[in-house]
Image (tube, grey):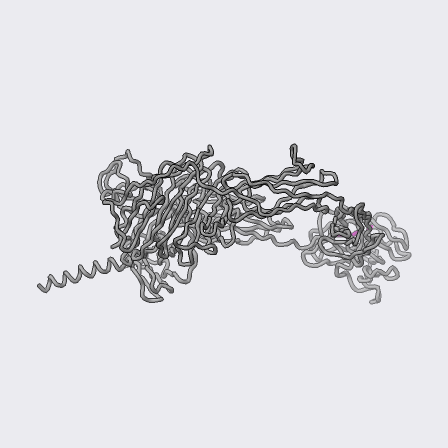
Amino acid sequence: MKIKLITTQIVAFIVFTSFNLYGQGAAPSSHLNYSGGNMNSDIWMNSVNVPITSTYTYYSVMGWNTGQEGGGYCGIQDHPGGKAFIFSIWDPSNHLPIVGAYAGPGTKIENFGGEGTGLKSMNFALGWSPNTWYNLVSRVWQYNAHTFFGFWSQDTNTGIWTHLVTMDYPVADVYFRYNNDAFIEDWVGTGANVRKVLLKDAWQRADSGTWILQKSAAFDSNYGDEIRNGIYDQAFNSGTEADAFFMQTGGNTTHSFPERFINLSIESSAEAPDLTIGSVSSYDATYQPSNQTINMNWAISQTQSPQFSYTIDVFNNSSYKGDPILTTTDKIPQQRTASINASSLDNGTYYTRLIINDIYDQPSTPVYSTVTKIAGPTIALTSPINNAFFSSPASITINAIAGDISNTIDNVEFYNGTTLLGSVNTAPYSFTWSNVKFGSYAITAKVINNIGVSSTSLPVTIKVNSTCNTEGVAFGTSPAYQNGTSTYDKVFDGNTDTFFDYAIGNDGYAGLDFGVEKKIFVNTISFFPRSSHADRMIGGKFQGSNTSDFSSDVADLYTITTQPTDNTWETVNISSTKGYRYVRYLSPKGGYCNITEVKFCGDFLFPKTTPTVSMLAPLEQNIVANTGNNIPFNFTVTDPDRALSSITIKDNGQIIATITKAPYTFILNNLTTGNHNIKVITTLEDNTSSTLTNFDIIGLNCNSTLWNNSTNYLVGDQVSYQNTIYCALAPTTSKQPNLNTALWRNIGTCPTLSIEDFKLNPEFSVYPNPSDTHFNVKLTKSEGKKFYYSLIDITGKKIIEKSVGYIGDATFEQKVNVEKLPSGMYILILHLDDQIVRKKVIVNKKNYLH
């Protein structure tokens, strides 16, 4: 009896522990699979009402193209962060990124992972309320060889429509296909709570324009989730209420039908949905003389069907007869402004008409606005001429002519780029810009008339050369003759009454150092010989170098071959294709470096702006991807001075790509199994290199054969079905894995079907790593949360899986024993409530000596 009692206590403990691990279970995930849908549709709509709700519940209202191009779903969530609208699309087969083309107020767009990868939008700001019907509409359209997906909602209590998001899907000719798959999901495990959803008016518009109402649907509650659901595995029900389908799960819910599925239908004779027609609530058009455009802006009624596209026509008659003389049209649902170039029109009155098409392609009632084109003021610069050269510090007079045949001129402003230099309000329109330093400048003039209309002149580019020597520091040979004052710096003092007289007859020089990373491209040299000693300059040289002692990298810019004219400036033109930090005059033998003045003039090369390079894809952190996948690399580069020479990508030390020009993209094709240490190196034109980023891509081999209903499978055969791996428990043919748990064991979702990051997260740490015996998992914010983990190898095979249950302490540690595993790389997957963190761990067996 004593032994029996102990055994009973152990069994009771195991049963209790099993329920406690899963919080006594989740509400069963259940689907409503509609039938009678279209082959190709461009509009799907469905209405949703949640009379009973619970946090952590996803009410998916529409799901399309599962496992196909353009697959996605949308609906509402009762989320811990609020009541949200959600719209998600899985990544395309070409691996190009989906782009958020528009985010409505409060909508956040981000990438997602877990059940495949893609782009999702969440909107908590709009919110939704229980016991309220919401009309949800999604539409696809073709735009610039891509497919765009739009998502709208309408609160039927207020009648207000909201455009939540538009996504740019980089594949053409994608449509909604076949039937809607709606579902209800408790994604955490709050099965004690009841949740209920009502769905009605599941309309689809075929590409032919025909509307079809899906009046039949098959409800099924997921098979094989007994452990996850626990005591709530049978807490589901479905049926119809009035003209709506309903699904209910959790709590004390019971079902009136014997199995986990039932076929349902509703009655309706409607041939098309009951739709309002979009309308424009305000519209205005104005003419802008400064750029000769007609600018339109408008607003639409929030309680009528939302805008999808617009067309604006311009007529030359108030009856709007005949063909318009100008037209603009576009499919941008959120756009409320447009502009038309009216430069081809004569001055006069014109008549504009706006028509919007709503999301159902119903045209609105036209609205009208009249505009008058008037001639704006004109202005042109008369001096300086384009590409004029000046010497610094320059004084530049800017002259303009301006006129206005319809109004009077109030002011003329003069600009260097966007910087206002000065203004005048009376003719002649002239301004003197003083003390202009070395550089290149774009000069414009802007005229403003008495009614505020302005015009800007074409720009004129001018260049101001250095004054030729003040930009550098003088250097030269010493001492001067008889230790006098005629030193080398006198060559650059601007005074023709002073001169350099070197104490030694040979090898004298005087020059300028322009500073670190600053070089002059000499285009002219002017020099003034010492009075009565011009003959001492014959054979003298003007040189450039990038070494201070002129021991290397020296160029003879000009050699004096004939005697210069005494007491006269002489200027020579230089054709230099290289810049030099140091320039000098080198005296010939016996010349005593006798020279009065030298001016080195030319263009300066300043230090280039360092380019900025950012990696957009993949994320700059460790990722895991399925073996055979293609991994796109995408960089954004800002390089105004074209200083970037290349971007080099290395895989485990081997160069796999060198990118030298835009677009800065590369695709790593056919990812192989194992760890790929990726290093991205940027190299500048001066051959200096730096590491932009260093991270790992882990290729996991999860390429199980897809399940085929005609294949004979044996015990142990492994297949992939709906992104999940199953192992055969017995010989079987044609038995669908997810519906026949006696024949197939669910190994788990193949983790490599998504690219998950391995973010450094202080709340999750694993140590020691590498290890030969065990890893310790440390959680720092775990109190009250459910924790379980699994360990997979490089082939995707699940090695360890353990559920720890709910944790009572804020800090928690779990030991993972790996002493029986062979050396190699593994992935430790940690689940804490709805958080998922992946850690790369290394088992490194030590060779012990005995």
Vertical order, 705 against 811 (above or below): above
Q: Work out which quarter of the rendered image holds the C terminus and state it.
A: bottom left
- The answer to whether residue 167 is left or right of residue 544 is left
| Image quarter of residue 804 | bottom left
Q: Nearer the viewer, residue 814 or 696?
A: 814
Q: Is residue 156 left or right of residue 228?
A: right
- Point 31% across, 41% down: residue: 264
Q: Is residue 125 magenta?
A: no
The residue lying at 90 percent from left, 57 percent from top is 531
Q: Is residue 540 magenta?
A: yes
**713 sits to left or right of 66:** left
Q: Nearer the viewer, residue 76 or 496?
A: 76
Q: Is residue 540 visible?
A: no
Q: Nearer the viewer, residue 173 or 93?
A: 173
Q: Quadrant of the N terminus?
A: bottom left
Q: Is residue 639 visible?
A: yes
Magenta highlight range: 539-544
The structure residue drawn at horizontal position 30% and vertical position 45%, both measured from the top left corner, is 239
Q: Which SS type dominates the magenta stretch?
A: strand
Pinpoint residue 385: horizontal percent, then vertical percent: 80, 47
Whether residue 191 sits left or right of residue 504 in the image: it is: left
Residue 479 x %, y %: 80, 64
- Placement of 516 over or under 342, stated as above or below: below
Count of all numbered marks drawn on residues in the image = 0
Residue 423, horizontal then vertical, whole percent: 79, 56
In this view of the protein, which residue sits in the foreground, 432 or 610? Answer: 432
Provide residue 568's location: percent of width, then percent of height. Answer: 89, 53
